[in-house]
Structure formats: structure tokens, C-alpha cells
Image: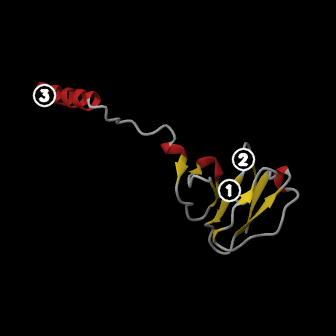
Amino acid sequence: MRKIAITAAGIAAAVIGSGVALAPAANAATTATSCPSGAVCLREPDGSILSKNIWYSYGPHNLQNVTGYKTTINSQTGGAGFQICTGYNGTGCGPVYRDTGEYLPHDYTPINSIVLVR
């Protein structure tokens, strides 16, 4: 048992001494690169999808600190769609988009909510 503990400590010291980082990146748990099935997502210009910009439930979702051009991705199933709205709580909405896949980048600076519809 003691030999195992010494070996583990030696490996940890060697890894730390070599400059290899074992901890995940700070934002690894908060970003994705693809929109999960059943969701609507906003993709950042760098290709990442922040966890705060992934929605599964129908109804309005208010946006906070979402500005600039984002790609909207509809990965919902069964013909479900989404609307983008200039007002909070799903007011001032545009048309319903039901096609699945990526949409052209849209300026979300004046947008305050997104609504998932059946």
C-alpha cells in the first residue's frame, strides 16, 4: 500500500514538474461545439455554444448580455420551431422558423428573447 502511495505521489510530482496541466479548462463545462438534439442554440463567432444559450423548453427565454452576430441552430424534433423577439418575455416576435439546422448569423444586439414553439 505504501509503495502505491509513493508511486502516485511520484507520478503527480513528475507531471506537475513537467508543466502538464491536469485540470480542465475553466470554461470546459460551460461550452459545447454542437447543439444537442431537441434544443435551440446560439453559436458564438468562435464556434462555441455557451450553456446559457441552449434552450429545451417551449416558451420565451429572456436573453442577457447576448450581443453581436450569432448563428441560431434549431435541433428540435417533430417540427418544433423558434422565434426571435425584440421584447422580453416573447413580445415583438418575428416569424416562426421551423427548419432544422443552422440559420445565417443574425445581430442579437437588439434581441431580448427567443421563444421555442411547438
Query: Which three-letter amino acid code belongs to the residue tagged 1?
Result: Lys
Q: Quadrant of the C terminus?
A: bottom right
Toward the viewer: 27 or 70?
70
Q: Counting residues from the N terminus, which is met first, the one under dot 3 or under dot 1?
A: 3
Disc sitting over residue 66 in the figure: 2
In the rendered structure, the answer to whether residue 40 lies left or right of residue 14 reads right
Q: Residue under circle 1?
A: 70
On the image, which quarter does residue 36 sit in? bottom right
How crowded is the residue under tag 3: few (<14 C-alpha within 10 Å), some, or many (20+)? few
Residue count near mark 2 (Cα–Cα under 10 Å), binned few <14, some 14–19, many ≥20? some
Residue 92 image offset from top left, x and y in percent: 88, 58
**Residue 106 or 95: which is nearer the viewer?**
106
Residue in the image at 73% along x and 60% along y = 106
Badge 2 amino acid: Val
Q: Is residue 33 placed above or below 24 in the rendered structure?
A: below
Q: Amino acid at mark 3?
A: Met
